[in-house]
Image: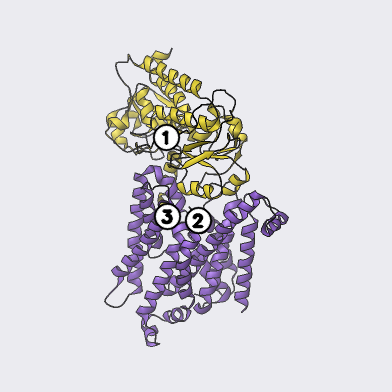
Chain colours: A yellow, B purple
Amino acid sequence: MLRKTLPLILLIALLSACAPQTTPTVAPVAPTVAATEAPVTAAPTEIPAKRYTDGLGREITLETTPQRIVSLAPSNTEILFAIGAGSQVVGRDEFSDYPAEAASIDSIGGSFGEYNAEAIVALEPDLVLAAEINTPELVKQLEDLGLTVFYLKNPVTLEEMYVNLDVVGQLTGHDVTDLIDSLEARVAAVDEKIAPISARPTVFYEIDATDASKPYSYGPGTFGDLLIQRAGGANLVTLAGITDAYPQVSLEQIVAANPSAIILGDSMWGVTPEAVLARAGWDALDAVKNNQIFPFDDNMVSRPGPRLVDGLEQLAKLLHPELFK
Amino acid sequence: MRPYLSSLLFLLIALLLSLAIGSVFISPQELWQTILGNGTEINHSILWKIRLPRTILIALTGAALGGSGAAYQGLFRNPLADPFLIGVASGAGLGAVIAMSIQWPYSFWGLMAIPLAAFIAALLTVFIVYLLARVGRTIPTTNLILAGVAFSSFATSLTSFLMIRSTSEVRRALGWLLGGASQSGWAAILAIMPYLIIGLGILAFCGHALNLLQFGDDQAQQLGLNVSRAKRIILTASSLATAAAVSFSGIIGFVGLIVPHLTRLWFGPDYRRLLPLSILGGATALLLSDILARVVIAPQEIPVGIITALVGAPFFLWVLKTAKNQGYW
């Protein structure tokens, strides 16, 4: 009987794989740094042995700056490359496809939730960077194999994402001040542009519409919801009073809320605006009548890394093109 | 004696293959050096800390599924019976998913919470089914199957509902339900060992009772078998072994169904032989499946539960089509 619900479950699994956890209570992510001085230069800086506390409350000691890092999540890989630690990465999970350089790094599996411990050990990593999509059991297994594992908790806000950048920066010996400053500046620029708007368009963000009568979307507590609001839109899901993080919204509810824009986060799976136009019952929506249906790279919303800011900018441009001329 | 010898030989080959083959290539020479203690540190780690515990856990799980499957098929006199027929899998799944919905601290007991919950829920499910199916002092087989199937469906639906509600843990739950070893290492093996030894040990000696049960409850009773007691013992032993096996390895389908049938096709329907041979065969079959799961798309790994049916089904159909003693059941 489980097999029957499998395709559906598999889809949600894939979707939630890279998405932030729903529980908004995030344990302190800031590391406790024993030594006081922070690295300043761009190249990986040699640091004295430092102790950190990771997202599982584990104490981690780094004797030297890690030069052989294995990333267990796409968001971690993106963070490592964004802070300039890409050359220190020797292994990545199967889903890590950004930036393009990541493709040439050895994969250690993970597409079925099964990570290849043998391959990880064979890479002789001095740091394994895990994320919330990895199970504590995996962390334990790698720990028992004598590896140093740091578990990075998912951020729920952009500010927590910056903290994560800082944490990984400290772990890998990179100064991330400039990166965070520029990200903050870009977010502030969007905020400023959006500030004067008088009306927020109702947005339906589609994650999966395999069943077009009840597609999946982002609800409260997800970056999908957060970025739509921040980009000057109103998330249909939140408007409808739905509290689930990844709800399946009935078409009736969508029609009743009548979104003026539809974002196709499932365009990466081949869903096109034309396909939406052809769906039975969807022609009643303003977004469909006015052809306000936009393909979108869902990875910029679902992966809790620096590309969330790219996602914010692109959403703002889609929802308020007149402000970004 | 020959069936036992060949079964043991196959098991030995599977065990060696499982140690030799993995996603990381270790040449036979390096492997030998590592066994002697002269290998590199990495090979040492891979062989003793990853491959050996995994091999043992998989072999034990396969043995439990094969043995319980044979016992259930005999007990229910039903060729479709597998170790999960009356709720071990659905109960374990429900227990695991409930445990996964809670954020456990990162500690020994926090990490043990999921297998423990799966184990307890599996046994609880079988016990409830048993109570529901009991009529007076007897346990009619049909009642047991019907109660088991109905209660399993109920538990499975509840599991699916919980999984859909708590989307963040779906991936983990899915991996578990498809038979991905969530946890390996020696702790897991030590934890399930007692239940497997007791469960399978009892089953190995239930062959005579199962032979008698093939005549039907009434006849078996007349032939001097305490039918209710025999059923209770077989149910308890199978459930203990299966629940322990799935608690760490997840739900691995099909092995418990086809291994007893293959054994029957090859070595005949005498349960005194069928049971021990199914235990050995289950271990071998799951080991071979697990090797495939590791190498098919290496460096990625597939949950072994996918392989068992994907490769097991065609293999079984081929044996079914070519076997000589067709009217075996």
Instruction: Write the residue at 38% across / 65% down.
Output: B86
In the rendered image of this protein, does residue B21 appear above or below residue A311? below
Quarter placement of the C terminus of chain A: top left
Chain of the residue displaying label 2: B
Seen from this angle, which residue lies furthest right? B29
Residue found at the very far top of the displayed protein: A325
- In the image, which is nearer the foreground, mark 3 or mark 1? 1
Q: Report x, y in % for residue B158.
A: 33, 53
* Helix, strand or loop at mark 3: helix
Label 3 vs label 2, nearer the camera: 3
Q: Which residue is drawn at 52% across and 47% down?
A: A143
How far is disc 3 from disc 2 in space, using C-alphas?
Answer: 22 Å
User: Do the residues bearing badges 3 and 2 touch, measured as CB atoms within 8 Å?
Assistant: no
**In the picture shown, does residue A273 fall above or below B326?**
above
Q: Is mark 1 on a helix, strand or loop?
A: loop
- Secondary structure found at label 2: helix
Which residue occupies 61% across, 63% down? B15
- Residues indicated by labels 3 and 2 sit on the same polypeptide chain: yes
* Dot 3 or dot 2, earlier in sequence: 3
Nearest the viewer among B155 and A45 is A45
Name the residue carrying label 1: A29
Residue B302 placement, left or right of B228 = right
Residue on which disc 2 sits: B305
Q: How crowded is mark 1: few (under 14 residues within 10 Å), some or many (20 or more)?
A: many
Task: Give the amino acid type for the residue marked by disc 1 in the picture.
Answer: Val
Chain letter of mark 3 equals B
Q: Name the residue under label 3.
A: B112
Give the distance between the C-alpha atoms of the residues marked 1 and 2, in whole angstroms.
36 Å
Q: Nearer the viewer, mark 1 or mark 2?
A: 1
Residues indicated by labels 3 and 1 sit on the same polypeptide chain: no
